[in-house]
């Protein structure tokens, strides 16, 4: 009997792993292509010098800080669509995709209104004049894609909740290919195009994202002939915002804390420190994509289990997801320790700035190896809680840790006590580890079991 029980547990584990990886690999590809867009921008402007590299990478990060509130809000579309899919209500899941697209339209309107404010905001930040000017041009163009960025996320989360992670993957691959081709044509000027440098990178990213979104949206609209949606309901839109806004605020306030860290704490250390930090962040973003994909896939399985009234399966799903993610992040940490210069070499292409970039970046990269397990734990747990509708507590946890610990701690260490960039990155380690521990306590409390994400009428 004991052996039979072990065989059953092993079979369940294999089944969970297969389902997790089947959902995860297209998400990994999708997220990796998004990171490749940022990495391609950085690598393809690196030969223009440290100012261009800093302006492009910091500009992309600041654009994301503006996109992240509506993006984080529409992440909740996956929670609704996965639970409704588990209940067999495909029309309800499709309605929540439309509500996500409504959020995307609002994001585009706000982004357009923000463009005239950019010069005044950038003048208040301690960037060197050349970096500030180039970044302003980059941001003005990149904000034109806000609606497409958020719309892609809304539709990707809708399809992901249904278990179809491959269609969004294809859209993201198309965006990546178009972006790299656009960079090649517009940064240095090929095929008769003007050499636009940093602005060329922004135009390529904006056009590629817009075209990929239009393609995915066309598929979504065409499917309306086969899948009923029903009448859109204001009450459901309010419900999406009720659970989605804490998720969006969660991401936004964490990102604004990081923007403060970049634009105030690290920018005061000079252009080389900004460029090195952004290279380290780009590298970590790319390395983190398998964990993000695993976390998203785990959240889909969690949502579907809750929708099917199988909450007892959730802890095992979360445990398996974390085990796989932790194994990957541990391998990443070992690679950073073993070959930091090899990891950074693609970005050190300008002979004049490469030695300083490698020296500063090497120290930052080695410190970042310490946050890998914390990053994995925070991602898996936050995604699982989001899938259950527990979005308010993670928001407050991130806000408290980001603004009461990380932001002031890094500011005092660097700007008051004179510490270098490695100490600044050390505060990122402390933040991610603390966040993972807090979210673990929350998950183990079982509060998520008492949350009703989907309206009782939908269940009926």
Image: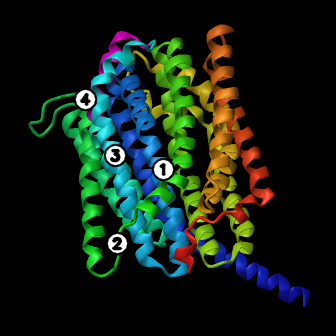
Instruction: Residue lying at the far left in this picture: please name it.
Output: 192
Circle 4 — which element? Answer: helix
Mark 4 and mark 2 residues within 8 Å of each other at the beta carbon:
no
Circle 2 — which element? Answer: loop
Q: Which residue is mark 1?
A: 73
- Lower position in the chain sequence, tag 1 or tag 4: 1
- Lower position in the chain sequence, tag 2 or tag 1: 1
Instruction: State the residue at coordinates (47%, 79%).
Output: 89
Q: Which residues are magenta?
A: 127-142
Q: Which residue is mark 3?
A: 106
Instruction: State the residue at coordinates (65%, 45%).
Output: 375
Circle 3 — which element? Answer: helix
Quadrant (top left/top right/bottom left/bottom right) for the C terminus: bottom right
Does 219 lie within the magenta span? no
Q: Quadrant of residue 19?
A: bottom right
Mark 3 and mark 1 residues within 8 Å of each other at the beta carbon:
no
Note whether residue 251 is visible.
yes
Q: Alpha carbon of mark 3 to alpha carbon of mark 4: how far?
A: 25 Å
- Residue 18 x/y as whole percent: 60, 74
Q: Alpha carbon of mark 1 to alpha carbon of mark 4: how far?
A: 29 Å
Does 140 lie within the magenta span? yes
């Amino acid at each position: 009997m004991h052996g039979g029980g072990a065989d059953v547990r092993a079979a369940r584990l294999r089944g969970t792993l297969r389902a997790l990886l089947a959902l995860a690999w297209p998400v990994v590809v999708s997220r990796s292509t998004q990171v490749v867009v940022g990495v391609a921008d950085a690598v393809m402007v690196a030969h223009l010098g440290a100012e261009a590299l800093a302006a492009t990478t910091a500009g992309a990060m600041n654009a994301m800080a503006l996109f992240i509130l509506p993006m984080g809000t529409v992440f909740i579309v996956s929670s609704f669509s996965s639970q409704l899919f588990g209940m067999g209500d495909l029309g309800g899941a499709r309605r929540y995709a439309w509500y996500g697209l409504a959020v995307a339209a609002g994001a585009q309107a706000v982004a357009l209104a923000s463009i005239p404010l950019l010069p005044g905001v950038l003048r208040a930040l301690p960037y060197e004049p050349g970096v500030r000017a180039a970044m302003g041009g980059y941001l003005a163009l990149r904000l034109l894609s806000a609606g497409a960025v958020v719309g892609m996320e809304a539709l990707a989360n809708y399809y992901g909740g249904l278990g179809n992670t491959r269609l969004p993957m294809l859209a993201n691959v198309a965006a990546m290919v178009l972006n790299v081709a656009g960079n090649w044509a517009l940064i240095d000027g090929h095929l008769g195009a003007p050499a636009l440098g940093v602005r060329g990178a922004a135009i390529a990213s904006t056009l590629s994202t817009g075209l990929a979104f239009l393609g995915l949206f066309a598929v979504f609209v065409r499917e309306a002939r086969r899948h009923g949606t029903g009448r859109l309901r204001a009450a459901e839109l309010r419900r999406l915002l009720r659970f989605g806004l804490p998720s969006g605020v969660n991401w936004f306030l964490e990102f604004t804390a990081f923007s403060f860290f970049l634009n105030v704490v690290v920018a005061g250390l000079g252009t080389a420190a900004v460029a090195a930090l952004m290279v380290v962040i780009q590298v970590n973003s790319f390395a983190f994509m398998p964990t993000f994909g695993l976390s998203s896939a785990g959240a889909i399985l969690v949502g579907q289990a809750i929708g099917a009234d199988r909450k007892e399966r959730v802890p095992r799903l979360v445990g398996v997801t974390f085990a796989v993610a932790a194994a990957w992040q541990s391998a990443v940490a070992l690679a950073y320790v073993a070959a930091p210069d090899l990891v950074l070499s693609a970005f050190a292409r300008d002979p004049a700035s490469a030695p300083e970039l490698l020296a500063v970046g090497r120290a930052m990269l080695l410190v970042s190896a310490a946050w890998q397990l914390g990053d994995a734990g925070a991602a898996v747990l936050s995604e699982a809680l989001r899938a259950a509708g527990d979005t308010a507590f993670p928001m407050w946890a991130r806000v408290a840790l980001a603004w009461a610990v990380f932001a002031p701690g890094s500011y005092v260490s660097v700007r008051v006590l004179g510490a270098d960039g490695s100490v600044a990155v050390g505060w990122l380690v402390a933040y991610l580890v603390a966040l993972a521990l807090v979210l673990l306590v929350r998950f183990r409390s079982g509060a998520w079991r008492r949350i009703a994400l989907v309206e009782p009428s939908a269940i009926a």
